[in-house]
Image: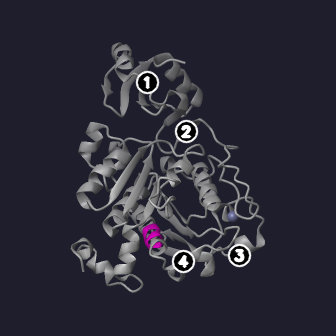
């Protein structure tokens, strides 16, 4: 065994793996969408496993309340206000320097998901792993995965429950390796035709989230991603795993029929409504954050943080680094935290109202 492979000895011993499997992992690219609770565990495990190239996309910066479950981050990252994707990249470099990590500090949406997919070493990424906290983004990812015939491992956790499921999409020619192996699975929209309406579902804001349930779900996702990347198609689960760690239940939902009996807009009719931007929005209320994100792509790279900081300092404390500007502002006696990113996004914390957020932004940054 060459020195390069020695560190992977314990997994090379596994059935269906061997040196050949390890070499496949090292030659592969994974896109991790979101680097929060799920995404940090996924990035950590896939880097240790030797997935050669990880593209990590996340729009957020690290806060103290993240440390309860987001395993790649520490108090220094909170203090230095480092974006999650960048902090993950730095930490992973100390864990496995053989792995290339591309950090993308950006919102993942219909306008950029295909660009992210195309950053893969082999032309396109070999798998997409879900570390997202909302269904709108998941549907965008699902559309892109189905359109380009890329496996997509869904995962979600809130409160004490979680779910994981590997989507091996049906393709027009039916000649993908997983279809040849007879193991294609329904896509996310085959199973959930529409997103649960806001307010109906618990969020991490209303229900909280237990750290270990996130770990369980994301490790399930990693297992399926590793099977995909090593071509162990017949080993991949064809059910949706649901777990409630407080009720001590694990259920495997049989979802295979959802494709056969349904008329899925996405994977059967191949209409990619989310990817086409039909349902996209430029203002997003952030899950669990009492915050609103505003996106103005036309401002990408055009904001002069030093100039804005000078204007904001009379209103409160301002911190600037090359990734972002953060200011604490009192407006009509109400405290807000305003964060500007170099890519044209802004997060206004202290409100869930898009109109209030837009007003704060235009007051202190400009219309
Ligand atoms: Zn479908």
Nearer to us: label 1 or label 2:
1
Q: Earlier in the sequence, mark 4 or mark 1?
A: 4
Q: Is residue 24 above or below residue 360?
A: below
- The location of residue 177, given as percent across then percent down, is 57, 76
Residue 223 magenta? yes
Mark 1: few, some, or many residues within 10 Å (few <14, many ≥20)?
Answer: some
- The location of residue 22, given as percent across then percent down, is 36, 75
The label number, if any, that marks residue 303 in the structure image = 1
Residue 265 magenta? no
Distance from the alpha carbon under mark 4 to that under mark 2: 34 Å
Distance from the alpha carbon under mark 3 to that under mark 2: 34 Å
Residue at 33% from the left image edge and 51% from the top image edge: 88
Q: Is residue 296 above or below residue 229?
A: above
Q: What residue is shown with label 4?
A: 237
Q: What residue is shown with label 3?
A: 257
Question: Can the viewer see residue 135 in this picture?
Answer: yes
- Label 3 sits on a secondary structure element that is helix
Q: Is mark 1 within 8 Å of ligand 1?
A: no
Q: Is mark 4 within 8 Å of ligand 1?
A: no
- The location of residue 289, given as percent across then percent down, is 46, 41
The colour scheme of the drawn protein is one colour
Nearer to us: label 1 or label 3:
1
Quarter containing the N terminus: bottom left
Q: What residue is shown with label 2?
A: 285
Is there a contact, CB below 8 Å, between mark 4 and mark 3?
no
Left or right of 128 on screen, residue 28: left
State the predominant SS element of the stretch in magenta: helix
Distance from the alpha carbon under mark 4 to that under mark 1: 47 Å
Q: Earlier in the sequence, mark 1 or mark 2?
A: 2
Span shown in magenta: 221-226
Q: Earlier in the sequence, mark 1 or mark 3?
A: 3
């Amino acid at each position: 065994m060459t020195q390069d492979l020695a560190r992977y000895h314990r997994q090379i011993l596994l059935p269906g793996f061997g040196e050949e499997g390890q070499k496949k992992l090292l030659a592969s690219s994974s896109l991790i969408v979101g680097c929060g609770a799920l995404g940090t565990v996924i990035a950590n495990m896939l880097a240790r496993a030797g997935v050669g190239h990880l593209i990590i996309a996340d729009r957020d910066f690290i806060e103290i309340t993240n440390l309860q479950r987001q395993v790649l981050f520490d108090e220094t990252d909170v203090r230095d206000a480092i974006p999650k994707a960048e902090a993950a990249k730095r930490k992973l470099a100390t864990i496995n320097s053989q792995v290339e990590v591309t950090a993308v500090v950006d919102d993942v949406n219909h306008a950029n998901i295909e660009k992210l997919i195309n950053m893969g070493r082999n032309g396109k990424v070999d798998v997409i792993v879900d570390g997202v906290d909302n269904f709108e983004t998941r549907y965008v990812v699902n559309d892109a995965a189905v359109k380009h015939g890329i496996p997509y491992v869904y995962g979600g956790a809130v409160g004490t429950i979680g779910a994981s499921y590997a989507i091996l999409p049906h393709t027009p020619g039916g000649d993908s390796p997983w279809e040849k192996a007879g193991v294609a699975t329904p896509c996310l929209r085959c199973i959930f035709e529409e997103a649960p309406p806001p307010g109906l579902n618990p969020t991490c804001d209303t229900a909280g989230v237990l750290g270990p349930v996130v770990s369980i779900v994301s490790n399930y996702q990693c297992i399926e991603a590793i099977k995909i990347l090593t071509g162990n198609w017949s080993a991949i689960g064809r059910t949706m795993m649901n777990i409630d760690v407080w009720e001590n239940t694990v259920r495997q939902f049989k979802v295979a029929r959802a494709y056969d009996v349904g008329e899925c807009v996405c994977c059967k009719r191949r209409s990619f409504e989310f990817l086409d931007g039909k349902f996209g929005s430029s203002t997003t209320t952030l899950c669990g954050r009492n915050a609103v994100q505003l996106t103005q792509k036309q401002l990408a790279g055009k904001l002069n943080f030093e100039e804005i900081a000078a204007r904001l300092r009379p209103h409160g404390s301002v911190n600037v680094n090359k990734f972002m500007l953060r200011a604490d502002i009192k407006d009509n006696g109400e405290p807000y935290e305003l964060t500007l990113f170099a890519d044209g996004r802004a997060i206004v914390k202290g409100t869930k109202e898009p109109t209030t957020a837009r007003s704060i932004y235009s007051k202190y940054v400009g219309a």
